[in-house]
Image: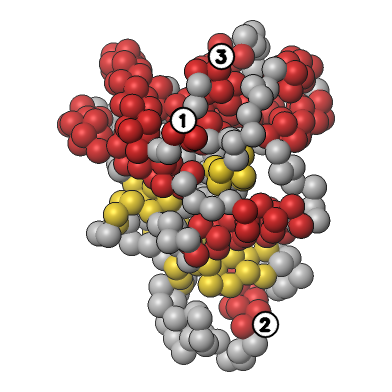
Amino acid sequence: MSDSDAVAPDTAVALLATLAGASGSEGLAYAAPPVSLQGGYYAEMIRFRLADPPEGLAGDLVARIVPNPVVAAWESALQRDVARQGFPTPSVRLVADDRTPLGRSLLVMDHVEGRSTLSGLHGIGIVTQIPAVVRHLPDQLAALAARLHALDAHAVTAELEALDGGIPTTTKGFVEGELWRAAVADRPDLVAVAEQLIATEPPSARRAISHGDLHPFNVLVTASGPVLIDWTVARVAHPAFTLGFTDLMLSNPPLEVPSALGGGLRALGRSLARRFHATYRSLAQPADHVSAEELDWHRKVHALRILVELAGWDAAGARPASHPWLILEPVTERLLGITTRTR
């Protein structure tokens, strides 16, 4: 993530007060004005450093400010567990619920100095960067997925199941949640898709820590290797919960390009997806290999997730001007057999 704008003064003051209360340290001050970070759609992200930090809060840090306290507890449990097992993700330093001056939940983690593989990739610039993307991206994503799925999921499974907040701990429950949100948004077509997915889930007992949002913009390339961020969607699920989403994103790169480059970009995406799956199978444990049926079902689960989120924005009159889901909308509609509606 890159630095963006200055933080609103009220937010900067509330963050400092929340840090002081959560750490039991009075008189905290910033070493320099905190700055917002680009790239967060769900959570507000702020980079900061404290002038005289208490134990555990030294160095460059990132405050992830999350509207939902249950989601914050879920994220922090997963991120802490995978970091404890040596997986490359920022270590969580502090967690505070929404009963603070911020009025929202807070996760404080290490700041990672790195850039996405696709940073600055747009328009005609894609042409010059294609060789580097083809050379590194599929293998990088596949290696992260295989390493993540090999972790021990038992401890975090028990922790997630103990959370009291209604987040489903099964993929079926995840789809049922999307069904409910589709109904609230008055989208019977998406409700029907969700019902069909629930009825056709491929049977499998395999469960792993699965990210579910593994795409290039959630991977920061650092001097010591790639680092995976953003655990909002992650859960203990079938490995295809990760692979289905990554396949959808790679096969249909959500990048704005001149129309003349569109066909070439889609062909490149399909090639990247094939390379990703081949590398994953070469690195992952045999138990974590997925069938074509499992991959297709989970890909449709994520297509449903995208369309339900868009439907919610439309129902609230809050569709953003720019978001990857806007580019993926027609792709996911075709995948699920949804007739494009006039908006």
The earlier-in-sequence mark between 2 and 1 is 2
| Rendered view: 280 above or below 162 | above
Comparing labels 2 and 1, the label whose residue is closer to the camera? 1
| Rendered view: 120 above or below 227 | above
How far is the residue under mark 2 from the one under mark 3?
48 Å
Which label was assigned to residue 289?
A: 1
Amino acid at dot 3: Leu
Q: Residues within 10 Å of mark 2 (few under 14, many from 20)?
A: some
Amino acid at dot 1: His
Using residue 253 as the reference point, say whether residue 291 is left or right of it.
right
The earlier-in-sequence mark between 3 and 1 is 1
* Residue drawn at x 42%, y 22% as measured from the top left: 252
Residue linked to disc 3: 335
Across and down, in percent, residue 14 comes to 64, 73
Asked whether disc 3 touches disc 1, contact meaning CB atoms under 8 Å apart, the reply is: no
Instruction: Give the structural element (helix, strand or loop) at label 3.
Output: helix
Residue linked to disc 2: 21
